[in-house]
Image (cartoon, rainbow, N blue to C red):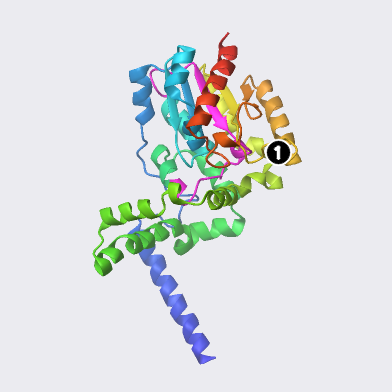
Amino acid sequence: MKAFLRYVFLLFITLFALSLYIPKRYTVSYPKSLGPDFDKKIRMTYIKNLEEDHAEIVLLGDSTLGDAVDADLLEQGLEKETLSISLPGTAATLWYLITKNNIIVSEHKPDYLVLFVRDSMLTVPHYRTTGTYFDLIDEFANNKDTVLLNKAYINRMSVGEQLAEKYFPVFGSRWRIRETIDFYIRYPLPEITIGCDKDCMIASMQEVFNEADINDKHLNEALFVADSILYKREFLDFEGTVEESFLPEIIRLCEENDIQLIIVRLETVRFPTEGVEPPDLQKYFLLLEEYLEENDVIYLNLSRNPSLRAEHFVDDLHMNDKGKAVFTPILIEALKGVFK
C-alpha cells in the first residue's frame, strides 16, 4: 500500500511540475484555448504564382492529382493558363485554407477552381489534420480561423477532452511534446551514439523508407488502413456530414469571388468495378452530385473510364506515367465540355 501511495504522490508531483513547465516551455496560455496553436504567418506561395502567371484554371488536390494529370499537356489542350497544386497527404481542410488564404485574396483570381477527390475525403473535415499532416496545415492557417478550429478539431472533442485540453497542459500540448521527443530521438541521439548528424539522418530515412523499395502489396495495405476512416458508415452519410465539412465554405468562397468550382472524381483501382464498391459509397456520390448541382458546382465523374486499367496504376490510388498519358486527354475533353 505504501509503495502505491508513494507512486501516486510522485505521479502527482510530476504532473504538477509539468503543468507549470509546459505552458512556459511552449508559450501556451493557461487555461489553453481549444484546438491547436497555429503559427501567425501564412504561406503565400500560390498568391505569387497566380499574380505572376495569371492562371485561368487552378487544379487542387493531393498526390493523386500530380500523378494523374500532366499540367503542361492540359494547359496546351485547353489553351488556358493553368496552375496545378498537388500536395501529397492533403485533403479538404488544406484545400479550404489554400482557397481562403491564397486564391481568393490574390489580386488575380482564376476563373475556375478544380478539386480532385476520391471516396468521402471531401466531407471528413478532420481527415489528415494531425501528426505529420498538421505541419502543412499550420503553414496556411492562423488562430483566428474559427471555422477551421471548430470543423477540423473542436467539434470532434468530447466535453472531457475539451476540459483536459484547456486545464491539463500535458494533454493540451501533447502534439508539441510528441514533436519534441521525436526530434531528440531522431536527431541528437543518433549524432551522439553513432555520429550521424541531422542531414545524415534525413538522407538515411529517405533511403530506408523510399516508396519505390516498398512491396506493392504492403504499400496498398498501408494506404487502405490510412484511408479506412473514409469508409466508416458515419462518414459515408453525406447528408449527415456535409454541413459540418469544409465543402459549403469552399463553395461560398468561390461563389463570392466569381470562381466556378469544379469537382472531379478521380479514377482509382481500389474498387475497380461498381460490384465491389461499398453500396454506401455509391449512395454518397449520388447525393454529392445532387448537392453540387443544387449549388451550381460542376461535377465530373471520371472514375469509370474503360480506357484506364490496373496496368496504369502503381498502387490502388496513384497512376503511373502511362496512366497519366491516358487520363490527361480524358480530363481535357471533359473540361472542354464545361468551357463551351
Q: How many other residues sit within 10 Å of disc 1, few (<14), some (14-19) or many (≥20)?
A: many
Q: Is residue 199 magenta?
A: no
| Residue 116 x/y as whole percent | 55, 30
Q: Is residue 106 magenta?
A: yes
| Residue 243 x/y as whole percent | 65, 35
In the rendered view, does 320 fall on the left or right side of 192?
A: right
In the current view of this chain or complex, which residue is farthest to the front? Answer: 311
Magenta portion: prevailing SS class: loop
In the rendered view, does 307 fall on the left or right side of 52?
A: right
Residue at image point 31% right, 57% down:
201
Looking at the rendering, the stretch of residues picked out in magenta corresponds to 105-134
Q: Quadrant of residue 267?
A: top right
Q: Quadrant of residue 255?
A: top right
| Residue 310 x/y as whole percent | 60, 37
Residue at image point 53% right, 50% down:
219
| Residue 221 x/y as whole percent | 58, 51
Q: Which residue is mark 1?
A: 281
Considering the image in quadrants, where does the N terminus appear?
A: bottom right
Residue placed most toward the observer, 129 or 37: 129
Considering the image in quadrants, where does the C terminus appear?
A: top right
